[in-house]
């Protein structure tokens, strides 16, 4: 059974509730090691009114403990969640665990704590000096993002032949897909033969180069973006390469919001994550946060 | 009962089959008048092996008749479909019908016939000298497009205050929505407070101006695009304003491809249409084209 380090996320949010509620379920799939101090764990369990399972194995993140304040953006909580994540990454790098799974952090709290990264993936890129690929989805479909958190106006100029080729090769080597992967065009109607933009020519060239390199039809020609996700089209593909954030994530989340997870590819370690935030609005309330995304993040490992 | 002129679309495609198969169904909702010659109708009905219903009322498009060639891009068929559409528009303008509904045309055939428009909406804009709004969707949700058939790289610069204000006012006056309308941001995470683009500020200003003008909360603040279409968010809205083609149509078609219709708003006449093409691959074959979109286009009237 695989050993998985679970970074505990922002303790003012819903992460710890999900971890405690789901422990008995996830231990069927993996051997979880939670990166949290016993003291913080006790505090959270008391606040939540959930008993700590006997086999809830923890490792300290070596961070300063603090008083949990539900739903509060805070420097202390931000730093704690960062240290928990950092420890998980180091354990994976040292091969003491087989993978990591991350519970949600609060970006504002990270900023308050002086953490210089906008999120988990950003830190992983810097830590491993590798161009991580962000992929979101669930068993039914996964979407990998060619560009992520950049303004829409900057997307088109990022479609450069070398970059697309590298991305496709990295994706292929990370996933080794057993069926054809859908590559989306950039423009409406995939450019309609150049009338509505011509970045599809670059994408097409990149696809041709990579398919030729591996002597296989791995990737499709650039598909019409708003047709690629129709029910009929989805029957043909499990993996989609989207050229930009909302092109891929708007349809994915319209279809599979609750089930979806976030996977970091093209790194020396495997990292999965829930695809939701700290949900401060329901943190430490009577509402039990739903855990479909968390369970799927664990199962993916 | 409303009188509706139905332009017959490209006779080498599936339009006429849909019209013949669905006549008994749509006459429950409207009084249809098909813009096709008796001669062409007989030819098609024979080829399809479908009897012409007794009450299948027609008006000639005053175009040259021709020999139907299933699935063929052709000048004659292109011109015929254009004339059929033109006649329907003229009947509506003259108030001889209450609305028009259009069956699919082939854009290449229009081009071959020297028709200077890329599609129906384009012709309507020119004919009425009005800025038609393209809206797609079904009973569950409708998406109106702020920009349509332009390259992705040109989208951001189209977000200008005056244009957005005019669009929102035109949309409001066309629909008179009874519940709040979702307005999408342009950038991932709706710009994340300007970190990922700042066009949301312009959209926000436009929303504020229009809501103030009508003294009502008609439009939302710019929503995070990939969250706006999640199941929970969709519970709150029937109408969505997308800033660009694939932002709105990729999620719409992922969810409701078969049911969706196309509506032209902000014109002196009402025009609805199926949201699919001529489907040459199944034209005049044993496969009966499905008519959900057509029925919905008629029901919308």
Image (cartoon, coloured by chain):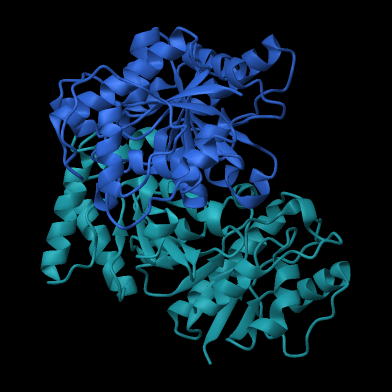
Chain colours: A cyan, B blue
Residue depicted at 53% across the width and 92% down the height:
A1
Q: Is residue A118 above or below residue A31?
A: above
B232 relative position to A225: left or right: right
* Residue A102 x/y as whole percent: 57, 68
Q: Is residue B226 above or below residue A291?
A: above
Residue A267 picture quarter: bottom left
Q: Closest to the observer: B137 or A224?
A: B137
Image quarter (top left, top right, bottom left or bottom right) of the N terminus of chain B: top right
Residue depicted at 39% across the width and 65% down the height:
A235
Q: Closest to the observer: A149 or B156?
A: B156
- The residue most toward the bottom is A1
* Residue B273 x/y as whole percent: 44, 32
A186 relative position to A106: left or right: left
Q: Closest to the observer: A83 or A161?
A: A161
| Residue B265 in view in this figure | yes
* Residue A11 x/y as whole percent: 73, 63
* Residue A50 x/y as whole percent: 84, 75
Q: Is residue A142 above or below residue B244?
A: below
């Amino acid at each position: 059974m695989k050993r998985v380090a679970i970074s505990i996320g922002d303790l003012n949010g819903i992460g710890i509730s999900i971890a405690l509620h789901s422990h008995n379920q996830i231990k069927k799939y993996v051997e979880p090691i939670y990166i949290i101090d016993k003291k913080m764990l006790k505090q959270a369990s008391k606040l939540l009114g959930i008993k700590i399972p006997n086999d809830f194995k923890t490792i300290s993140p070596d961070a300063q403990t603090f008083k949990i304040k539900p739903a509060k953006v805070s420097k202390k909580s931000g730093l704690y969640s960062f240290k928990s994540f950092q420890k998980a990454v180091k354990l994976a790098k040292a091969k003491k665990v087989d993978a990591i799974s991350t519970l949600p952090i609060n970006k504002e709290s990270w900023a308050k704590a002086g953490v210089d990264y906008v999120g988990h993936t950003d830190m992983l890129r810097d830590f491993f000096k590798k161009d991580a690929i962000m992929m979101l989805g669930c068993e039914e479909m996964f979407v990998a993002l060619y560009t992520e958190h950049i303004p829409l106006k900057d997307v088109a100029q990022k479609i450069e032949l070398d970059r697309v080729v590298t991305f496709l090769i990295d994706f292929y080597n990370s996933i080794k897909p057993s069926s054809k992967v859908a590559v989306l065009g950039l423009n409406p109607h995939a450019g309609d033969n150049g009338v509505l933009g011509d970045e599809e020519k670059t994408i097409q060239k990149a696809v041709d180069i990579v398919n030729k390199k591996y002597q296989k039809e791995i990737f499709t020609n650039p598909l019409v973006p708003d047709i690629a996700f129709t029910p009929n089209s989805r029957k043909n593909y499990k993996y989609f390469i989207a050229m930009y954030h909302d092109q891929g994530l708007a349809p994915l989340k319209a279809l599979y919001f609750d089930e979806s997870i976030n996977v970091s590819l093209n790194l020396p370690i495997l990292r999965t994550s829930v695809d939701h935030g700290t949900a401060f609005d329901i943190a430490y309330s009577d509402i039990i946060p739903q855990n479909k995304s968390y369970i799927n993040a664990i199962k993916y490992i």
